[in-house]
Amino acid sequence: MRSLDEVYGDLEGDRHAREAEISLLERLIPASPGADRDSLKRSLVLLIYSHVEGYCKFALLTYVAWINAAGLKCVDASYPLVAATMGKIFAALRDPNSKHDYFRNIAPLDASLHLSAREQIFVESYDRLVGAQVNIADKVVDTKSNVTPELLMKLMFQLGLNYREVEKHSGNLSKLLGIRNAIAHGDRLKVPRDEDVRDFKETAAAVMAFLQSEVYLALREGRHRRQVVAA
């Protein structure tokens, strides 16, 4: 299992590599001819977005990997991590096609009856479930190739991280995504303004730095463990 210092080093190294690549492309723009300058600015927006999305996924998967390797039992883990671990179980509980064997033919359309059967199976399995080890699937961190502020908050919420801090970056994140989509979908006239590119770069740096800090602090402060409330 990796130490917290190693986790921090991984997060820091990945962030610095992404920021260096953004800065490298940015330095090419001022010395380029007009038409090339526009193309480079468009390319820079695409690169900035790809690194924001890539780092979001990298940081959150780093958190998930560390949690999975910790051998933490569900009974000791924070509630969001337990819920994330039990995703398949909850899906089965909600599945209307899952029916009690005996009543499958007698009362196949009685939805409340079959829901009750699924609930009983869940309750009967509860002790085994809470004694199981936390194991979060990578697919929980699905950026869907469109990291909106709402999606990033959702992913962080599901992992018990401080999702509210994303709000302060929501405006530029949404704008970056909008321009990125316009460029990626063939809008040749969409040339970002210099001030927009600057804001996007600053937003990318701030979001990546925030995620690095949030993941590291959550682990160091033990927020992945269930907090015991004093009586």
Image: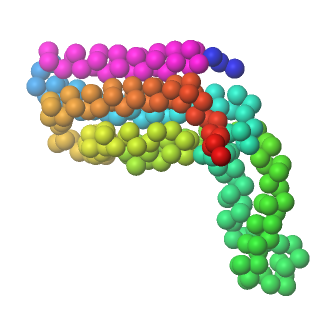
Magenta-colored span: 4-31
Does the segment drawn in magenta span residue 57?
no
| Residue at 68% in and 57% down | 90
Residue 218 as seen in the image, left or right of residue 129: left
Q: Is residue 39 above or below residue 131?
A: above
Observer able to see residue 175: yes
Rendering quarter of residue 197: top left
182 relative position to 59: left or right:
left
Q: Residue at 15% of width from left, 30% of height from top?
A: 194
Could you tell me if residue 152 is visible in this image?
no
Q: Identify the residue at the far front of this view.
A: 231
Q: Position of residue 117 (x, y in %)?
A: 80, 71
**Quarter placement of the N terminus:** top right
Q: Position of residue 24 (x, y in %)?
A: 29, 15
Near-viewer residue (223 or 214): 223
Q: Is residue 12 magenta?
A: yes
Residue visible at 42% across and 35% down in the picture: 53
